[in-house]
Image (cartoon, rainbow, N blue to C red):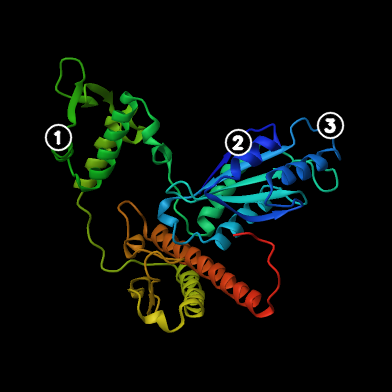
Amino acid sequence: MIGKIIAGSSFGATVGYVIKEKSRILEFDGIEPPGVADMVRDFKDQTLLNPRIKNAVGHISLSFSAKDADKLTDPVMTQIAREYMECMGIRDTQFLIVRHTDQAHPHCHIVYNRVGNNGQTISDKNIKIRNGKVCKELTAKYGLYYPKGKEQVRRERLRESDKTKYAIYDAIRGCLSGCKSWDDLEKRLQEQGITTAFKFCGNTDRRQGVLFGMNGYTFSGSKIDRAFSFSKLDCHFSQAQRIVTPVARPRYSAQAVGNLSAAVSHYRSAFIGLFGSRGNSGESVDLGGFGVAGGMTLPPGGCCGSIAPEQMQWRIGESHKEHIARVTALIRQATEAMLVEQMERSRKLRTIKTNKPKFRIH
């Protein structure tokens, strides 16, 4: 989940942009959809309560990975958007949440009035810093995919030299985990049309830098990504070749095992409440290695709270304490995601039973 703060000085232009052919209104307050002119008038009328605010237009887009498309139903996206607004201090004011369906990745737009219902100011101080923090927190809470670094870049918009650089980045990232030496990496990259050359220290044969080339362009490893500098790649290969003495059975503290046991108990309850009789259809994971009796059934892939078995495996360089803490956190995130989905289903059922009029347009 990535939030983008979009500058805008006109409610007319902003509302006109978010209301397009491939869009649908998820939720609103203080305005009267679906007419653009009516909504713009409502927004402008409220700005008269505080004419000192020069720019009353608030506009934020929330983008999600295509990997989370199945999870992000309209109600779930609406709930995330509302929680995002609350965490950002966007409350007691007019707002409009619109989902766009014109791109592969799910995303929505939040348009709000920085002049609150009582004339108060909705602060935008440090909004970008707060936005990044809130997005990370909600991504973790709902078990969403969070692209890091270069994964966020839209490659189709890059210039040719940058396209090549990112193509090299993708190639290295894709094969590095299976490489245990420079020779392994060089061979795999060569198969993809990428050359590897080294810088040497003076007149010696001691390597001190690495260059990757493709399509007539050459970049040092650190220019591709800081993680691909010569020193960091060399360290990676050293660790990959290191022989680790096997341990018969890791020892975990009683507190760590207790935390995991409690997390598993809550997970099982949430799983049964959400999936019911389907609980035996998923893949089972044994937790005996952690000192926790019994196993746990994982939700089917693509469902809320899904965990891949490999996510629970021990990672190279990870201590036993870090391992059990990470697994515990994964299970807690999955539990929260399932509880949110369960609450949403219950809400839908209550709505159907009571036949109350809806205030959302889908």
Q: Is residue 219 above or below residue 309?
A: above
- Going from the N terminus, do you reach mark 3 or mark 2 first? 2
Tell whether 42 sits left or right of 304: right
- Going from the N terminus, do you reach mark 1 or mark 3 first? 3
- Residue occupying image coordinates x 46% and y 78%: 275
Residue topped by disc 2: 6
- Residue 203 x %, y %: 15, 15
Give the amino acid at mark 1.
Gln
Tell whether 194 sits left or right of 144: left
Residue topped by disc 3: 52
Does the CB distance between marks 1 and 2 fall below 8 Å?
no
- Residue 271 x %, y %: 47, 76
Q: Secondary structure at mark 1?
A: helix
Which quadrant is home to the C terminus? bottom right
- Residue occupying image coordinates x 32% and y 33%: 166
Q: Secondary structure at mark 3?
A: loop
